[in-house]
Amino acid sequence: MNHAIRLLHLEDNPLDAELIRLRLQTAGLSCDIRWESGREAFESALAQETFDLVLADYKLPGYDGLSALRHVREKQPELPVIMLSGGLSEEEAVDCLKAGATDYVLKQRPQRLDTAVRRALVEKEEHAALRRAEEEIRRQSLFLRQVIDLNPNFIFAKDRAGRFVLVNQAMAEAYGSSVEEMLGKAEADVTADAQEVARFLKADLETMDTLRDVFIPEEKLIDAAGKERWLQTVKRPIVAADGRADRVLGVAVDITERKRAKDEIMRLNADLEERVRQRTAQLEAANKELEAFSYSVSHDLRSPLNAIDGFSQLLVRLDGEKLSDKGRHYLDRIRAGTRQMGELIEGLLSLAQLSHDQLRSEVVDLSAISRQVEQAFREREPERQVQTHIQDGLLTHGDPLLLSVAMNNLLGNAWKFTAKQAMARIDVGSELGADGSPLYFVRDNGAGFDMAHAEKLFGPFERLHSQSDFSGTGVGLATVKRIIGRHGGRIWAEGKVNEGATFYFTFGRKVESGDGDGRGDSNGG
């Protein structure tokens, strides 16, 4: 030891006390010895100071060493005490050891004293270390117990007989018991359902025998309150040093609310599927009615219109010379009205047809379609001066027929509203949208429109210009919007009066990029 040994010595003979001091000094032990000869001084010193060891004479007048030993054990149970005596019988030595003496030394054999002192001090240190280790183990056990008990999940361990060797508070409460009551009990003692007990034991043994985890996604438990609870459990083997498992650790999560939510979602999905089925049947019925209506419109309205137009032509041919100029003008107005009515009927039928036709999906070249449409317009109106710019490689996925209708309407709109421009210009191209996907456009420098009325552009039969200024039915842009919508995209327009308009549109499906990004120009003369 690095410090002097603090030693309390109870001895009535000063000569014996000095001999003890010299003996310890000769043995190389550095001792700070307090010598007391009576009871009162001895007990006072023990209460006021700290000592490493007590030496006590077994026989003292009025205060024997055995009484001193008992007092030390009462006040400081861990303090080593070595009994000294000039003559100690075997029976007295046993009494001393039973009373808690660390050792005893006969005064006529002082050579044992230094060995006894060293051994007593070593044992004291070992006992102190053991107490510290036990306290740390106790503290860690308490900590782990709290961690286990504070966990809301069920935590348990069982042996091969199905007896609980570990249970946490949450599980004990679910079984209407306490942790102490459940320990040592078998599954059958706490679970009334024999089938459940057999199933639990089977999973336990499988885990221990295979040394593999067992996952149980759902298992039902009726708790102490009679409440149905659903658990999701993982069982793992506890492997001993010999490589075998004789215990199983289980952790069960209460998934009752999750299961209820899942069951509710499944019920709602089933209800939704039934509603969808009913709605689909209603839509199918509505589509059949629409088809019947379309047939009626096509047959019942076209026939009288054709009759009006035909008889108007006959009237001009047979009695044209008898008609006044005003009469001819009226007949021309009648024929123009029938033609416009026919166009409206065609537009209405086309718009209705778009709602239920099967949509195909393939690569569509919007650049090629635009050039075909442009060529058709030039052949129809060769006198028009229109400069067009159609970007190459405008590829997308969609229905080729419907997208041809859409581009025909968009370019036809641009062609029509640039009719009063000395040098008309139409651009077809694409640019990157805010989300990085292609944003297609058709732009012209024609009549334009007031943005305050932009929401009316795509409504059926909505017109922002008079029939006398620009002819049309007001169905074309509504048709385009429906086609773009069926392709998962959207369309909108920007414009200014007399400064042109730009129609932007996107597609919801994946867009293929073209081989090149140049622009092909064709100038009309």
Image (tube, grey):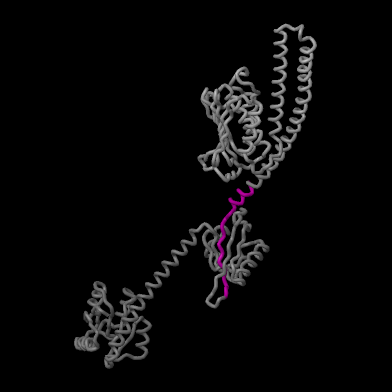
Determine the residue positioned at 63% across, 40% down: 365
Residue 252 colored in magenta in the image: yes
Tell which of 370 and 503 is nearer to you: 370
Place residue 244 in its image quadrant.
bottom right
Classify 105 as above or below 144: below
Residue 391 colored in magenta in the image: no
Determine the residue positioned at 62% across, 72% down: 209
Numbered label tally: 0
Place residue 44 in its image quadrant.
bottom left
Classify 510 as above or below 291: below
Q: Left or right of 235: which side holds 193? A: right
Q: Left or right of 226: which side holds 62? A: left
Quarter placement of the C terminus = top right
Determine the residue positioned at 55% across, 70% down: 238
Residue span colored magenta: 244-264
Task: Give the percent coordinates (x, y) of residue 397.
Answer: 63, 42
Place residue 462 in its image quadrant.
top right
Task: Give the percent coordinates (x, y) of residue 96.
Answer: 35, 84
Tell which of 137 and 367 is nearer to you: 367
Observer able to see residue 91: yes
Quarter placement of the N terminus = bottom left
Observer able to see residue 13: no
Task: Give the percent coordinates (x, y) of residue 222.
Answer: 62, 56
